[in-house]
Image: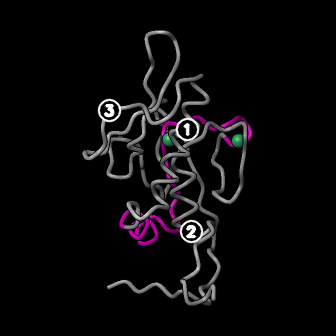
Amino acid sequence: MKIHMQVGEPPMPEQPIRIQLSRTRGWRMPENTLKIDRSTRWGNHFHVIACEDGAFEVRCRLPDSDSAPKAAAGTLAAALGAAVGLYGAWLNSEWGIHTRRRAKDELRSKNLACWCRLCERHHAGRPFGEACAACQPCHADVLGRVANGLTCEPLAPARTA
Ligand SMILES: [Zn+2]
Ligand SMILES: [Zn+2]
Protein backbone atom coordinates (compact mmCIF):
# COMPACT_ATOMS: atom_id res chain seq x y z
CA MET A 1 0.00 0.00 0.00
CA LYS A 2 1.20 3.47 -0.85
CA ILE A 3 0.89 6.08 1.85
CA HIS A 4 1.17 9.76 1.04
CA MET A 5 2.20 12.13 3.77
CA GLN A 6 0.11 15.30 3.89
CA VAL A 7 2.64 17.52 5.62
CA GLY A 8 6.38 17.91 5.33
CA GLU A 9 6.72 16.14 2.03
CA PRO A 10 10.11 16.74 0.44
CA PRO A 11 10.04 19.03 -2.60
CA MET A 12 9.77 17.35 -5.97
CA PRO A 13 13.20 16.84 -7.50
CA GLU A 14 12.08 18.09 -10.87
CA GLN A 15 8.95 19.95 -11.83
CA PRO A 16 6.59 17.77 -13.84
CA ILE A 17 5.56 19.27 -17.18
CA ARG A 18 2.80 19.07 -19.80
CA ILE A 19 4.06 17.61 -23.04
CA GLN A 20 2.60 17.73 -26.55
CA LEU A 21 2.31 14.33 -28.20
CA SER A 22 3.78 14.15 -31.68
CA ARG A 23 3.41 11.88 -34.69
CA THR A 24 6.80 12.95 -35.99
CA ARG A 25 8.83 9.94 -37.01
CA GLY A 26 11.32 9.02 -34.30
CA TRP A 27 9.57 11.06 -31.61
CA ARG A 28 9.24 9.27 -28.31
CA MET A 29 7.57 10.21 -25.08
CA PRO A 30 10.13 11.40 -22.55
CA GLU A 31 10.74 9.30 -19.47
CA ASN A 32 8.37 9.56 -16.54
CA THR A 33 5.56 10.63 -18.88
CA LEU A 34 2.00 9.36 -19.02
CA LYS A 35 -0.31 9.77 -22.00
CA ILE A 36 -3.69 11.17 -20.89
CA ASP A 37 -5.51 11.71 -24.19
CA ARG A 38 -8.95 10.26 -25.00
CA SER A 39 -7.53 6.82 -25.72
CA THR A 40 -6.84 6.54 -21.99
CA ARG A 41 -8.97 6.54 -18.84
CA TRP A 42 -7.72 10.10 -18.15
CA GLY A 43 -9.22 11.66 -21.30
CA ASN A 44 -11.43 14.75 -21.12
CA HIS A 45 -15.05 13.65 -21.49
CA PHE A 46 -15.98 17.22 -22.45
CA HIS A 47 -15.28 17.47 -26.15
CA VAL A 48 -15.65 20.06 -28.88
CA ILE A 49 -18.10 19.56 -31.75
CA ALA A 50 -18.10 21.51 -35.01
CA CYS A 51 -21.63 22.71 -35.78
CA GLU A 52 -22.98 23.04 -39.33
CA ASP A 53 -23.06 26.82 -39.11
CA GLY A 54 -19.31 26.97 -38.49
CA ALA A 55 -19.56 27.50 -34.74
CA PHE A 56 -18.22 25.08 -32.14
CA GLU A 57 -19.84 23.76 -29.00
CA VAL A 58 -18.99 21.46 -26.11
CA ARG A 59 -20.71 18.16 -25.37
CA CYS A 60 -20.17 15.65 -22.59
CA ARG A 61 -19.42 11.96 -23.12
CA LEU A 62 -20.07 10.78 -19.57
CA PRO A 63 -22.57 7.89 -19.66
CA ASP A 64 -25.02 9.71 -17.37
CA SER A 65 -24.91 12.95 -19.34
CA ASP A 66 -27.46 14.03 -21.95
CA SER A 67 -26.42 15.19 -25.42
CA ALA A 68 -27.29 18.87 -24.86
CA PRO A 69 -24.45 21.35 -25.48
CA LYS A 70 -22.60 22.15 -22.26
CA ALA A 71 -21.29 25.51 -23.42
CA ALA A 72 -22.70 28.15 -25.73
CA ALA A 73 -21.63 27.85 -29.36
CA GLY A 74 -18.70 30.05 -30.30
CA THR A 75 -15.25 30.05 -31.83
CA LEU A 76 -13.01 27.00 -31.69
CA ALA A 77 -10.69 28.70 -29.20
CA ALA A 78 -13.61 29.56 -26.93
CA ALA A 79 -14.99 26.02 -27.13
CA LEU A 80 -11.59 24.46 -26.35
CA GLY A 81 -11.27 26.73 -23.35
CA ALA A 82 -14.79 25.89 -22.21
CA ALA A 83 -14.13 22.14 -22.51
CA VAL A 84 -11.13 22.47 -20.18
CA GLY A 85 -13.02 24.79 -17.83
CA LEU A 86 -15.91 22.34 -17.60
CA TYR A 87 -13.50 19.48 -16.93
CA GLY A 88 -11.90 21.48 -14.11
CA ALA A 89 -15.30 22.25 -12.59
CA TRP A 90 -16.25 18.57 -12.84
CA LEU A 91 -12.96 17.32 -11.38
CA ASN A 92 -13.24 19.68 -8.43
CA SER A 93 -16.89 18.82 -7.79
CA GLU A 94 -18.16 15.89 -5.75
CA TRP A 95 -18.49 13.88 -9.00
CA GLY A 96 -14.79 14.14 -9.64
CA ILE A 97 -13.65 13.01 -6.23
CA HIS A 98 -12.52 9.51 -7.28
CA THR A 99 -10.64 10.79 -10.30
CA ARG A 100 -9.10 13.49 -8.10
CA ARG A 101 -7.86 10.94 -5.58
CA ARG A 102 -6.57 8.71 -8.30
CA ALA A 103 -4.78 11.60 -9.99
CA LYS A 104 -2.96 12.48 -6.76
CA ASP A 105 -1.99 8.84 -6.39
CA GLU A 106 -1.01 7.95 -9.94
CA LEU A 107 -0.09 11.21 -11.70
CA ARG A 108 1.91 13.01 -9.03
CA SER A 109 5.39 14.04 -10.19
CA LYS A 110 4.70 12.65 -13.67
CA ASN A 111 4.79 14.53 -16.97
CA LEU A 112 1.41 14.37 -18.73
CA ALA A 113 1.17 14.15 -22.50
CA CYS A 114 -1.77 15.14 -24.73
CA TRP A 115 -2.26 16.30 -28.33
CA CYS A 116 -3.22 19.86 -27.40
CA ARG A 117 -0.79 22.42 -28.80
CA LEU A 118 1.89 24.07 -26.73
CA CYS A 119 3.24 27.46 -27.80
CA GLU A 120 6.68 27.89 -29.33
CA ARG A 121 8.24 28.95 -26.05
CA HIS A 122 6.90 25.82 -24.35
CA HIS A 123 7.32 23.36 -27.20
CA ALA A 124 9.55 21.15 -25.02
CA GLY A 125 7.02 21.18 -22.20
CA ARG A 126 5.50 23.52 -19.63
CA PRO A 127 5.53 23.17 -15.82
CA PHE A 128 1.99 22.80 -14.42
CA GLY A 129 2.48 25.72 -12.08
CA GLU A 130 3.12 28.09 -14.97
CA ALA A 131 0.18 29.67 -16.79
CA CYS A 132 0.44 30.57 -20.47
CA ALA A 133 -2.19 32.18 -22.66
CA ALA A 134 -0.34 31.22 -25.86
CA CYS A 135 -0.53 27.46 -25.19
CA GLN A 136 -3.81 25.77 -26.17
CA PRO A 137 -5.87 24.99 -23.08
CA CYS A 138 -5.72 21.30 -22.11
CA HIS A 139 -7.20 19.21 -19.32
CA ALA A 140 -3.62 18.03 -18.67
CA ASP A 141 -3.08 21.37 -16.93
CA VAL A 142 -6.05 20.70 -14.66
CA LEU A 143 -4.94 17.15 -13.86
CA GLY A 144 -1.32 18.17 -13.38
CA ARG A 145 -2.24 20.92 -10.94
CA VAL A 146 -4.50 18.63 -8.93
CA ALA A 147 -2.00 15.74 -8.93
CA ASN A 148 0.81 17.97 -7.70
CA GLY A 149 -1.14 19.96 -5.14
CA LEU A 150 -0.98 23.23 -7.07
CA THR A 151 -4.70 23.97 -6.63
CA CYS A 152 -6.68 25.47 -3.79
CA GLU A 153 -8.54 22.89 -1.71
CA PRO A 154 -11.60 23.72 0.35
CA LEU A 155 -10.86 23.59 4.07
CA ALA A 156 -12.56 20.94 6.15
CA PRO A 157 -15.64 22.50 7.81
CA ALA A 158 -14.11 22.26 11.29
CA ARG A 159 -11.16 24.42 10.27
CA THR A 160 -13.21 27.26 8.80
CA ALA A 161 -15.05 27.84 12.10
ZN1 LIG B 1 3.01 28.55 -23.73
ZN1 LIG C 1 -5.24 17.97 -24.25
Question: If you read the primary sequence from the N terminus, does the residue marked by circle 2 or circle 3 appear first?
Answer: 3
Q: Classify residue 42 as left or right of residue 120.
A: left
Residues marked 2 and 1 touching at CB (< 8 Å):
no
Q: Is residue 114 magenta?
A: yes
The amino acid on which the numbered mark 2 sits, given as a three-letter code, is Asn
Q: Residue at x 55, y 30 (%)?
A: 79
Q: Residue at x 45, y 64 (%)?
A: 107
Question: Residue 82 bears which disc, if any?
Answer: 1
Q: Quadrant of residue 160?
A: bottom right
User: Label 2 crowding class (10 Å Cα cut-off): few <14, some 14-19, many 20+?
Assistant: many
Question: If you read the primary sequence from the N terminus, does the residue marked by circle 3 or circle 1 appear first?
Answer: 3
Instruction: State the extent of the magenta-drawn residues as a range.
Output: 98-122
Q: Note whether ligand 2 is within 8 Å of mark 1.
A: no
Instruction: Please tell me whether mark 1 sits on a helix, a strand or a loop.
Output: helix
User: Label 1 crowding class (10 Å Cα cut-off): few <14, some 14-19, many 20+?
Assistant: many
Instruction: Please tell me whether mark 2 sits on a helix, a strand or a loop.
Output: loop
Instruction: Please tell me whether mark 3 sits on a helix, a strand or a loop.
Output: loop
Residue 3 image position (x, y, % from top left): 41, 86
The amino acid on which the numbered mark 3 sits, given as a three-letter code, is Ser
Question: If you read the primary sequence from the N terminus, does the residue marked by circle 2 or circle 1 appear first?
Answer: 1
Q: Colour mode?
A: one colour
Task: Name the quarter where the N terminus is drawn.
Answer: bottom left
Q: Residue at x 46, y 84 (%)?
A: 4
Q: Nearer the viewer, mark 2 or mark 1?
A: 1
Q: Nearer the viewer, residue 88 or 149?
A: 88
The residue indicated by pointer 2 is 148
Q: Is residue 118 magenta?
A: yes
The residue indicated by pointer 3 is 67
The amino acid on which the numbered mark 1 sits, given as a three-letter code, is Ala
